[in-house]
Image (cartoon, rainbow, N blue to C red):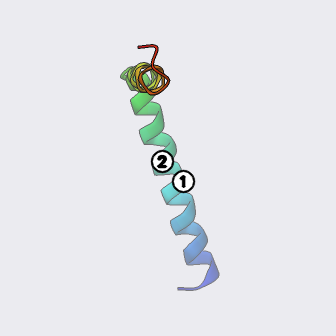
Amino acid sequence: MNRTQRNIVRLGLLAGGILFLGIGIARGEMAEVFLKATRICLECIGIG
């Protein structure tokens, strides 16, 4: 692969990542992940 082809692949992967990130946020997944992370942290320190 030459440099141009690698850049095209990188941009495609970046665009795909941004797309899926946007889809996850639109579906409300960000809030669910935040709630789970909060519960795990509270359990680790013994509050929850």
- 1 lies above or below 19: below
Tell me which amino acid carries mark 2: Gly
Q: Position of residue 12 (x, y in %)?
A: 50, 58
Q: Residue furthest top?
A: 48
Residue pictured at 60% horizontal, 69% vertical? 7
Instruction: Classify mark 1: residues with Cα within 10 Å, few (<14), some (14-19) or many (20+).
Output: few
Q: In which quarter of the image is residue 5?
A: bottom right
On-image quarter of the C terminus: top left
- Image mark for residue 3: none
Q: Name the spot of residue 28 as percent of width and height, x first.
A: 39, 20
Furthest residue to the front?
Answer: 46
- Crowdedness of circle 2 by 10 Å Cα count: few (<14), some, many (20+)? few
Identified by mark 1, the residue type is: Leu
Asked if disc 2 and disc 1 are in contact, CB closer than 8 Å, the reply is yes
Q: Residue pushed farthest bottom?
A: 1
Q: Which mark is residue 14?
A: 1
Q: Is 3 placed left or right of 12 in the picture?
A: right
Q: Where is residue 21 in the image (x, y as percent from the top left)?
A: 47, 37
Q: For mark 1, give the secondary structure.
A: helix
Image height of 16 relative to 39, above or below: below
Residue sitting at the far right: 3
Element marked by disc 2: helix
Residue at the spot of label 2:
17
Which one is in front, 19 or 45?
Answer: 45
Which residue is at a point 59% across and 85% down the rendered structure image?
A: 2
Q: In this view, does 37 lie to the left or right of 7?
A: left
Gap between marks 2 and 1, in whole Å? 5 Å
In this view, the residue in front, 1 or 29, is 29
